[in-house]
């Protein structure tokens, strides 16, 4: 099968698995996510160990506003659903629909980042800066590191959309779309843990 065949009915149902290179790319990405999981696990462990070390700074219960964080959580989870629709459209060779779902995913990711930036600015204005305490340092490191992953995902998907416009949906570009969706699901799952461990546990005490 030619790598330049695209959404005209000639691609297999799962084009990301049509070639050995594509399958290896997916497998390699899963291994990469395993390393990312270990890294995030380390940051979670550090936060849990330091979350009560506030010194004279504000506490989690004082800082966190759950309605805004819950809204951000719903936005990110909804964006994950959009990426599922994008992969489904790819499997159906519906390139235009796939691009639309990917664009919606990006827009929701940008909304999430906007809320996170607003949240951080609010915390800084209340005296919760990176060097205020061990709690603040571990909080910004964990949540900021996740935010950086979201920003990278937005940029990555945007570049993939540009590549699809240029080269079409092929057995070369399809695995890239697929692994970007896996990545997006991963950062959504990480955020669910952040929402639970950082925010909910912070409010409960």
Image: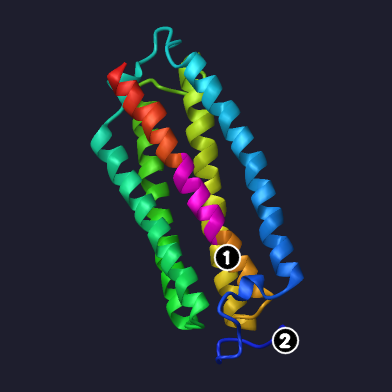
Q: Nearer the viewer, mark 2 or mark 1?
A: 2
Considering every residue shown, the one lying at the far left of the view is 67
Mark 2: secondary structure: loop
**In this rendering, would 25 be left or right of 64?**
right
Q: What is the x, y in percent for residue 81?
A: 39, 60
Q: Main secondary structure of the magenta part?
A: helix
167 vs 60: above or below: below
Q: Which residues are magenta?
A: 181-190
Of the image marks 2 and 1, the number of the one nearer the N terminus:
2
Which of the 4 image quadrants contains residue 6? bottom right
Instruction: Label 1: state its secondary structure.
Output: helix
How far is the residue under mark 2 from the one under mark 1?
Answer: 19 Å
Category of crowding for the residue at label 1, using alpha-carbon neighbours closer than 10 angstroms: few (below 14), some (14–19), many (at least 20): many
**Toward the viewer: 37 or 149?**
37
Q: Is residue 130 visible?
A: no
The residue drawn where x is 49% and y is 29% is 140
Task: Estimate the x, y position of residue 126 in percent, counting from the top left.
Answer: 33, 23
- The colouring scheme, among rainbow, by chain, secondary structure or one colour, is rainbow
Q: Quadrant of the C terminus?
A: top left
Which of the two residues, 99 or 23, is positioned nearer the viewer here? Answer: 23
**Residue 190 position in % (x across, y down):** 48, 40
Verify whether residue 183 appears in magenta: yes
Name of the residue lying farthest toward the top? 55
- Which numbered tag is attached to residue 1? 2
Q: Which residue is mark 1?
A: 178
Residue beneath the point at 57% across and 30% down: 41
Pick the quarter of the image with the N terminus.
bottom right
């Amino acid at each position: 099968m030619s790598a330049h065949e695209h959404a005209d009915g000639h691609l297999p149902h799962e084009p990301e698995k049509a070639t050995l290179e594509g399958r290896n790319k997916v497998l390699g990405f899963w291994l990469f996510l395993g390393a990312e999981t270990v890294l995030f696990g380390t940051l979670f462990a550090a936060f849990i160990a330091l979350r009560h070390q506030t010194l004279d700074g504000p506490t989690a219960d004082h800082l966190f506003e759950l309605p805004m964080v819950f809204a951000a959580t719903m936005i990110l989870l909804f964006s994950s659903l959009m990426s599922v629709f994008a992969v489904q459209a790819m499997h159906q060779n519906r390139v235009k629909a796939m691009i639309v779902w990917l664009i919606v995913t990006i827009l929701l990711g940008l909304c999430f980042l906007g809320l996170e930036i607003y949240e951080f600015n609010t915390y800084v204005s209340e005296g919760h800066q990176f060097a205020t305490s061990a709690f603040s340092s571990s909080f910004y490191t964990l949540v900021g590191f996740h935010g950086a992953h979201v920003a990278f995902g937005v940029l990555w998907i945007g570049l993939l959309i540009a590549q699809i416009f240029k080269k079409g949906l092929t057995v070369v570009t399809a695995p890239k779309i697929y692994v970007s969706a896996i990545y997006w699901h991963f950062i959504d799952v990480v955020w669910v843990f952040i929402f639970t461990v950082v925010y909910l546990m912070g409010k409960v005490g």
